[in-house]
Amino acid sequence: MTETDVHPIAGPRRYRNSTALVENSDPVWQAAADNGLIGIAVDPESNNRLVVPETGHAFANMCSCAYLGLNRHPAVIEGAVTALRETGTIELMTSTTRIRPTIQARLEEELGDLFGAEILLSTTCSTVTAGILPLLASGHLAEGGPRVLIFDRFCHFSMSYVKAICAEESLVLTSGHNDLDFIADACREYGSVAYVADGAYSMGGAAALDGLLELQDRYGLYLYLDDSHSVSIMGDKGQGFVRSRTAPGPLTTIVTSLGKGFGSGGGVAMLHSRAQAEFLARHGGPLGWSQNLSVPTIGAALASAAIHRSPELGELQARLRANLDHFDALLPTPLAGNGLPVRRIDVGDADRAVALSAELFRRGYYSSAVFFPIVPRGKAGLRVMIRADIDHDELTRFAGHVTELTADLPSSAH
Amino acid sequence: MTETDVHPIAGPRRYRNSTALVENSDPVWQAAADNGLIGIAVDPESNNRLVVPETGHAFANMCSCAYLGLNRHPAVIEGAVTALRETGTIELMTSTTRIRPTIQARLEEELGDLFGAEILLSTTCSTVTAGILPLLASGHLAEGGPRVLIFDRFCHFSMSYVKAICAEESLVLTSGHNDLDFIADACREYGSVAYVADGAYSMGGAAALDGLLELQDRYGLYLYLDDSHSVSIMGDKGQGFVRSRTAPGPLTTIVTSLGKGFGSGGGVAMLHSRAQAEFLARHGGPLGWSQNLSVPTIGAALASAAIHRSPELGELQARLRANLDHFDALLPTPLAGNGLPVRRIDVGDADRAVALSAELFRRGYYSSAVFFPIVPRGKAGLRVMIRADIDHDELTRFAGHVTELTADLPSSAH
């Protein structure tokens, strides 16, 4: 016998509402599925040529975060292999707070040199965030007791996901995107405030960093910035957008991913002191569990770090910039010229976005249809990521297809 | 000028309290650090011989979750290398909800065969949990609307961590450990209930599975069980403790890690339908972000899956059982004879646990001192994990040292 009498136990849904999320987005996901745009399994012949084995359909991935192509760099692959051969192990399967392989300690040092920071490593950037943000809220990362957390409305889900956990420790607010006035008002009202946002946004654009640093000077605003989408592609050592302009400090934490431009995997916190790194390894929840960065991932990251110290990094960054300039000239979008690799082609309606993505896929290009809740309602479109390893003529052809297929839209859309 | 006037903004601290956590545990962590027991960087010559390069100190790791030693199996290492060579990539760096390498699709199939389930893969088991539990609370994994979630008091932190997020969607309760009466009462009171727990517990022991299945039959209780600590080591194909006794179904989800007994890395959900796996890939938050299982990890897991289908699995399991029997005979602890690989040597006082761990480390054995909040207050001790690849005589020597160093304690402690 199954009890079917349901009691009114629904929660307050202040920070998430699964029902609204599913009801709004599932029909569009289903349309994407019906058009063969999700669940695609491919053999990667290169980043520009993925092949679906059953059908032989080949296409270019216009939606990979491997911005410099380092995920396929022969030295990076060999770095992974060498690490496996030298350590003879996949990982130690012990909490790295207690025991870690020297190869991981070496990676911490090398990243510390590149980024000018004390380094804490974990499996993913969202794990780093899950470990740090509640302790930022409770007042354990800086003086002054519990800290009001303001999440930018457009910050990555990996940050907004933990709002309810942070709200156990302090007041959690959501600001408009880059809304400096809102943040300044909160600083005046509460005194002890942190702002949580992307540096370079996953859906394009960047944080209002100059204004934020001014608020930090004036009010002691803590900045927690995830710069996963600009690391490697900006800065003479690939420090990224935020780290090129400011340093980790008592009021600044920068986190990033090694699984995008860097070409390997794992999450990184750039911290201002060894004591802070040790504190987080002890008390940062998932940062201390025995889920480790694997040895091949560490080896790949070490090889990528060596590339970051060599002239090759500048060459790859220049190639990416040239591709961005080329694309922006062919297909000007609102984000054109910002130096960051994410572009959006807004079409407004989610069904239209899916249809456009489907037709481009048929023509040999995968660019994600993005829709609520990935982007705001009515702002559906395509997400395109430009990489250093896309051929110039390929970009020309792709832009030509998009131009043709969106000719009826107002030009501001692209 | 920095604003120093702090307002009373502390949160309700219903599901976490960082201040209490840090105040209680940091002094013990510091004692562990002072005794050289954390932050150890080693070169792994084998799982039984880790060497600290600066000092030359060599020790056996008695605290690794690599229960069958598959993390160092030559075929597993070669599996990782082959996958790197064949795909020429670390990972695609695209959301796997959209595009994933065929090698990942192949791993899903092979695990599906081994575990008799539809498989959803992610970077870690805690990511799987973070994606699924809020949707279980909101009523999206089973009929009947929002579901009261009961977390076992001893469930792994990776589950209790998301309590506050689940509480956004439904009522969240905490039960005593294996407290079937509490769960039955809640089923009668609320009708729609899920119980969240470990299958085999990370700190030893197991779920009260027979009783739970009875409550499922009687009240439609949903079971969400993390069986990371028994997969590979139990079952003719390594299905683990829970999957050997029950199957994923409309009211049962089993999750596990491939980064322990399995010898590779990543998190797995064993689901009952493809539709459920697709639903979670779309709406399960971190399950859809572009943080992927890396290609070498997938390759290692494929090689381990092949071992799971071969007679070698049974041989490794038998070797582990023999080591467990040997250890339990030498050093009977309350968990002796349960067939699971985690043992606890309780000493009560946290400082004593740290001192014991330090002396054993000096003698060449690392076993973690565990203390609040890892285990309840007053229950500090050592956590020891028995593996298949520990030498018989090594175990004898280790047990001898522990016996000598705990001779003054009541025999019930060990």
Image (cartoon, coloured by chain):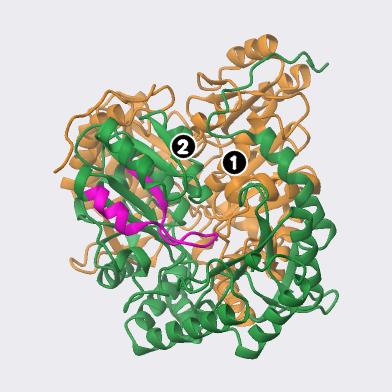
Chain colours: A green, B orange
Q: Is residue A100 left or right of residue A266?
A: left
On the image, the x and y values in percent for residue B335 come to 47, 31
On the image, the x and y values in percent for residue A133 come to 37, 42
- Label 1 chain ID: B
The residue where tag 1 is placed is B227
Crowd rating for badge 2 (residues with CA inside 10 Å; few <14, some 14–19, many 20+): many
Name the disc covering residue A163, or none. Answer: 2
Q: Please, what is the three-letter code of the amino acid marked with disc 2?
A: Lys
Seen in the picture, residue B34 relative to A241 is either above or below; the reply is above
Secondary structure beneath label 2 = helix
Kindly identify the residue that appears in the image at 60 percent across and 46 percent down.
B285
On the image, the x and y values in percent for residue B82 come to 60, 78
* Residue range highlighted in magenta: A194-216
Crowd rating for badge 1 (residues with CA inside 10 Å; few <14, some 14–19, many 20+): many
Seen in the picture, residue A351 relative to A289 is either above or below; the reply is below
Secondary structure beneath label 1 = loop
Q: Is residue A321 in view?
A: yes
The residue nearer to you, when weighing B325 against B80, is B80
The quarter of the rendered structure image containing the N terminus of chain B is top left
Kindly identify the residue that appears in the image at 55 percent across and 59 percent down.
A203
On the image, the x and y values in percent for residue B110 come to 73, 60
Q: Is residue A284 in view?
A: no
C-alpha gap between disc 1 and disc 2:
28 Å
Residues at badges 1 and 2 in contact (C-beta under 8 Å)? Answer: no
Circles 1 and 2 on the same chain: no
